[in-house]
Image (spheres, helix red, strand yellow):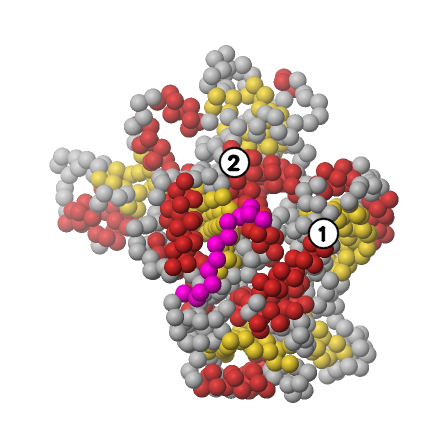
């Protein structure tokens, strides 16, 4: 007989053998309600990962036990099979119920642990808040279809019974000597014994080796909380003790860990993580803005806990997603670090959450279900009844207001870890110290770069523009090369010799002639991107080792890790990068940071423009002087008197954020009021505008709520679709959802026009 051994199945088998009440165990594991002694046909409400209005009703046949809420089931749907989750009886019920005998039957239940109550509640909460269907939210929790199927197995061997009279050759004896306590594949045994695979298979046929089927998904390593970490400073000790005490006591409580760059925030929340892991079966979630950019964080975690965490983000493969998802569902995965979608993993017992760099705008999902992961993480912690830490050197205004009002406990770190000091900030007024024509580096910055490199130290230049130039135009006819599907200019990428749209991804080769007038040698690049900056730096510093670090060059975690390693090891002199370089990296020999265009993010009508620019520039400035050597940051600006620049130079970020808060409060803007954005899109511009007018004319009259629009979006066309926006402004938080839901529901919808609703938008494009 072939035995079956896997991480989950082996644990379940052991639990069964050691459980005195086998009936109770089977009831728990098979997810059935065996209290119904008659076993009559039962109605089962199933939520499918589809944007439907509610649950669908199915039935269990006579003699089949009714599955409990949270059970994964396979059901028929429009001529195919679909996987859904048995939902709570009183949720998402609507319309007339069909008689039981007319319902289709559940095809099968899937042998997975129940989806926990808190995750089902979370899915319902997110759906209600974002005005999305619960099925659309469930799709994010079932984002790994392979995890719902049987896990592949591979044949391994363990010691069997050597039959009497078996002729024992030296090769056979070597194989038997190589058999240990753990199952091994035939190839592993053959390699270990130094024999051919035929010898192993021959022994298996005699019974001397017993075949066992082992899951290809091996268990994840368990964190070792006994490993000593670095000594903490006084304020770090105070902050970590507050978090540890709360984790030990249990229950929901949010913390804001407000610490300057390099102050050791990671080590502080690691202490909370350690406290949580002391209790068996408790799981921990760490959310990060962009998991592909956290190679140093993962290395740091492994050094601290002796194993890697479970990683979850969009770039991991199908097999890795399956392994991670099932390990989380079974409780075997103790620590998960992931991007925003990790919030929807099926944790069995979630005991602690950290949102690192909580201010980062990439936590806002702009497609599909539009939600902010930071805010939803607070809800997830509330429903799981566990503590949560929001960590940042530049907390968002929303988080600061919650901390100041007492909703969050604020923990402050104002000293850099070890001997490191905050960098010196200097402004270069480009009106007085302008670069040479066609150049982008001001003379004071060039001089500082030369001195830094002469000292054997490193330089980082920050410009948040990918490519070579944001615009290509013809000097002869003035034609600007645009995307054929979007209302944006094509960005030149000279490294790849192509033009690209950063909205839809359209790419075309860089033309030799003007597409409009066909003039030769008339196309010119306007404005700088990082590739153009690289060209200038390479000319000025011909002997320096220079690299560009952007999402175009760092296309996967491996490349990112290699680049970060090169910088940390001192193999590069100058690094030129976009926002990818601001993500918490520690480069001991980096002492000079140059911000090429400190005014870039301040342009436009985004209500968070000043806050975002300040946060981004503080983060990039924080890369300088993180070890013993002091750092300096130069800000090239045409507006040295701007409040953001003044706050950076003075180091008085609190005063800047206070002014931002007063301005938002004066006009009841988030976080004091609430916004809802209605985005209409379609192929026919007239139909899209007609839909906007229909909404505008049917807007209800509600005190304290203003309806604005319709108006063409700043990005009026994306991927061939015309876009129109309306904005709803409420002077108090929490009251717009029912108003917007009813307003959109009772407005006639024009065929071919898509309506998206974004509660508290972060993008106004």
Residue beneath disc 1: 668
| Residue in the image at 40% along x and 54% along y | 238
Which of the two residues, 100 or 200, is positioned nearer the viewer here? Answer: 100
> Does 507 appear above or below 140?
below
Residue 21 relative to residue 284: left or right = left
Under tag 1, what secondary structure? Answer: loop
Residue beneath disc 2: 118
> Does 237 appear above or below 570?
above
Q: Mark 1 against mark 2, which lies toward the viewer?
A: 1
Question: Quick check: can you spot residue 334?
Answer: no
Near mark 1 (Cα within 10 A), the count class, few <14, some 14-19 or many ≥20, is: some
Residue 531 relative to residue 707: left or right = left
Q: How far apart are marks 1 and 2 (CA)?
A: 33 Å
Residue 513 relative to residue 245: left or right = right
Q: Position of residue 606 (x, y in %)?
A: 70, 60
Q: Position of residue 233 (x, y in %)?
A: 37, 61
The answer to whether the residue labelled 1 contacts the one labelled 2, judged by CB atoms less than 8 Å apart, is no
Near mark 2 (Cα within 10 A), the count class, few <14, some 14-19 or many ≥20, is: many
| Residue in the image at 65% along x and 38% along y | 128
Magenta-drawn segment: 405-417
Q: Which of marks 1 and 2 is nearer the N terminus?
A: 2
Q: Does the magenta stretch include residue 125?
A: no
Question: Quick check: can you spot residue 365?
Answer: yes
| Residue in the image at 48% along x and 32% along y | 114
Q: Position of residue 708 (x, y in %)?
A: 81, 51
Q: In which quarter of the image is the N terminus?
A: top left
Q: Residue furthest left?
A: 165
| Residue in the image at 54% along x and 75% along y | 425
Which of the two residues, 42 or 630, is positioned nearer the viewer here? Answer: 630
Chief SS of the magenta region: loop
Q: Where is residue 419 in the image (x, y as percent from the top left)?
A: 39, 70
Q: In which quarter of the image is residue 376?
A: top right
């Amino acid at each position: 007989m072939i035995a079956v051994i896997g991480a989950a199945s082996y644990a379940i088998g052991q639990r069964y053998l050691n459980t005195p009440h086998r009936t109770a165990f089977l009831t728990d594991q098979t997810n059935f309600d065996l209290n119904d002694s008659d076993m009559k046909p039962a109605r089962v409400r199933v939520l499918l990962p589809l944007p439907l209005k509610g649950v669908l009703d199915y039935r269990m046949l006579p003699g089949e036990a009714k599955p409990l809420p949270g059970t994964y089931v396979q059901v028929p749907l429009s001529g195919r099979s679909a996987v859904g989750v048995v939902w709570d009886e009183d949720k998402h019920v609507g319309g007339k119920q069909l008689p039981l005998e007319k319902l289709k039957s559940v095809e099968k239940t899937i042998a997975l642990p129940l989806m926990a109550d808190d995750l089902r509640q979370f899915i319902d909460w997110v759906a209600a808040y974002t005005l999305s269907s619960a099925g659309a939210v469930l799709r994010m929790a079932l984002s790994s279809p392979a995890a719902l199927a049987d896990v592949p197995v591979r044949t391994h061997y363990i010691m069997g019974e050597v039959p009497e009279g078996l002729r024992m050759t030296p090769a056979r004896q070597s194989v038997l000597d190589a058999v240990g306590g753990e199952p091994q594949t035939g190839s592993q045994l053959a390699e270990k014994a130094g024999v051919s695979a035929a010898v192993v298979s021959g022994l298996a046929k005699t019974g001397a080796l017993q075949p066992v089927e082992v899951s290809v998904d091996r268990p994840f390593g368990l964190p070792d909380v006994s490993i000593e970490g670095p000594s903490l400073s006084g304020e770090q000790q105070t902050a970590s003790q507050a978090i540890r005490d709360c984790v030990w006591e249990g229950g929901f409580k949010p913390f804001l860990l407000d610490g300057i760059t390099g102050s050791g925030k990671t080590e502080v929340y690691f202490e909370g993580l350690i406290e949580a892991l002391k209790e068996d079966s408790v799981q921990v979630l760490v959310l990060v803005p962009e998991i592909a950019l956290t190679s140093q964080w993962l290395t740091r975690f492994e050094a601290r806990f002796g194993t890697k965490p479970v990683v979850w983000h969009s770039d991991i493969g199908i097999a890795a997603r399956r392994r991670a998802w099932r390990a989380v569902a079974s409780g075997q995965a103790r620590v998960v670090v992931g991007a925003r979608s990790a919030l929807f993993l099926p944790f069995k017992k979630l005991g602690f959450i950290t949102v690192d760099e909580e201010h980062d705008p990439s936590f806002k999902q702009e497609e599909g279900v539009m939600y902010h992961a930071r805010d939803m993480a607070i809800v997830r912690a509330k429903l799981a009844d566990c503590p949560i830490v929001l960590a940042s050197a530049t907390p968002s205004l929303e988080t600061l207001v919650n901390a100041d009002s007492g909703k969050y406990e604020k923990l402050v770190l104002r000293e850099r870890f070890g001997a490191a000091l905050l960098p010196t900030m200097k402004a270069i007024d480009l009106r007085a110290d302008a670069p040479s024509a066609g150049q982008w580096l001001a003379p004071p910055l060039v001089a500082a770069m030369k001195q830094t490199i002469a000292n054997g130290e490193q330089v980082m230049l920050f410009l948040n523009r990918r490519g070579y130039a944001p615009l290509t135009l013809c000097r002869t006819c003035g034609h600007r090369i645009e995307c054929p599907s979007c209302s944006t200019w094509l960005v030149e990428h000279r490294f790849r010799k192509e033009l690209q749209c950063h909205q839809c991804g359209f790419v075309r080769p860089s033309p030799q002639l003007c597409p409009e007038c066909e003039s030769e040698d008339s196309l010119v690049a306007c404005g700088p991107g990082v590739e153009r900056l690289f060209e200038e730096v390479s000319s000025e510093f011909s002997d320096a080792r220079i690299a560009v670090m952007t999402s175009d060059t760092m296309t996967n975690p491996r490349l990112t890790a290699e680049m970060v390693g090169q910088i940390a090891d001192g193999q590069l002199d100058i690094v030129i990068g976009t926002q990818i370089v601001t993500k918490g990296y520690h480069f001991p020999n980096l002492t000079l940071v140059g911000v090429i265009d400190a005014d870039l993010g301040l342009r436009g009508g985004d209500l968070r423009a000043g806050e975002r620019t300040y946060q981004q520039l503080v983060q990039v400035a924080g890369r300088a002087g993180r070890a013993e050597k002091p750092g300096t940051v130069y800000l090239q600006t045409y507006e040295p008197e701007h409040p953001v620049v003044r706050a950076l130079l003075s180091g008085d970020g609190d005063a800047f954020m206070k002014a931002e808060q007063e301005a938002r409060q004066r006009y009841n803007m988030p976080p004091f009021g609430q916004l809802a954005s209605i985005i209409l899109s379609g192929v026919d511009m007239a139909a899209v505008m007609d839909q906007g007018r229909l909404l505008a004319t049917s807007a209800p009259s509600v005190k304290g709520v203003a309806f604005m629009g319709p108006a063409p979006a700043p990005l009026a066309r994306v991927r061939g679709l015309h876009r129109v926006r309306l904005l709803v402004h409420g002077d108090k938080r929490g009251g717009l959802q029912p108003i917007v839901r009813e307003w959109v529901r009772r407005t006639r919808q024009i065929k071919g026009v898509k309506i998206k609703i974004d509660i508290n938008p972060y993008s106004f494009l």
